[in-house]
Image: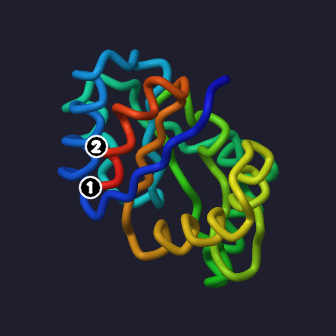
Amino acid sequence: MSQLIIGLARTENEAIIMLNKVKEEGIKDKYLGAVAKEQLNLELVSEKTGLPKPLKGAGTDGAFGALKGILAGLGKRMDQTMSIGNAVRRLAGNEIGSETDDLVLTLTEAGISEEDARYYEDWLLKDHILVIVECSEEEAARVRPILLF
C-alpha cells in the first residue's frame, strides 16, 4: 500500500537536497513533488532535481482567472500554491490562508489528517516548502529519515 511522506523544507536549497537524496534511494521522479506559495522559486528546485517545471493550477485562465485578477486588485486575493512533480499535480493552484480550506480539503482527501493538513498549510504561509514522496511501506523506512531530519 502506498503512503505519502511529507518533509518540511525551509528553503529551496533544503528541498533540492531532500529530493535528490530521496532519488538516490531509488524513488522514481513520478513519485516525488514539492509544493510552495506562488512566489517561491520552484523553478530552481525543478532545474536542480530534474522534476517537471512548476504548475500553478488551472484557476489562472478564463473567467475565474479574471475574477482572481479583480480580487487581487482589491487586495482580497488569497495566496495560491504551485507544485512540481506528478505526485502533487492536484496541489497546484490551491488557495491557502484563513479564508479558505482549499488546500486542507485536498490534503485530507489524500489521507492526511486535518490537523496535519492545517499545519502544512501554515508551513506554506510562512514561505516554506513541502516535499512530498509517495512510496511503499518498505521505501518509507528509507525516505523518512531524509525528509524528517
Is residue 7 or residue 52 the one in the foreground?
Answer: 7
Residue 129 location, x and y as percent? Answer: 39, 57
Residue 114 location, x and y as percent? Answer: 74, 65
Amino acid under disc 2: Ile
Residue 26 location, x and y as percent? Answer: 32, 16
Please report the residue visible at 54 percent of the width from the left and 23 percent of the height from the top. 136
Please report the residue visible at 58 percent of the width from the left and 60 percent of the height from the top. 80
Label 1 vs label 2: CA separation? 6 Å
Location of mark 2 (residue):
146
Location of mark 1 (residue):
149
Residue 117, which numbered label? none
Rendered view: 104 above or below 99: above
Rendered view: 33 above or below 12: above
Look at the image and name its color scheme: rainbow
Please report the residue visible at 23 percent of the width from the left and 31 percent of the height from the top. 20
Residue 34 location, x and y as percent? Answer: 43, 43
Tell me if mark 2 has few (under 14), some (14-19) or many (20+) residues whose alpha carbon lies within 10 angstroms of its own: some
Q: Quadrant of the N terminus?
A: top right
Q: Name which quarter of the figure residue 24 lies in.
A: top left
Amino acid under disc 1: Phe
| Horizontal side, residue 91 vs residue 51: left or right | right
Contact, CB < 8 Å: mark 1 with mark 2? Answer: yes
Rendered view: 125 above or below 9: below
Tell me if mark 1 has few (under 14), some (14-19) or many (20+) residues whose alpha carbon lies within 10 angstroms of its own: few
Dot 1 falls on a residue whose secondary structure is loop
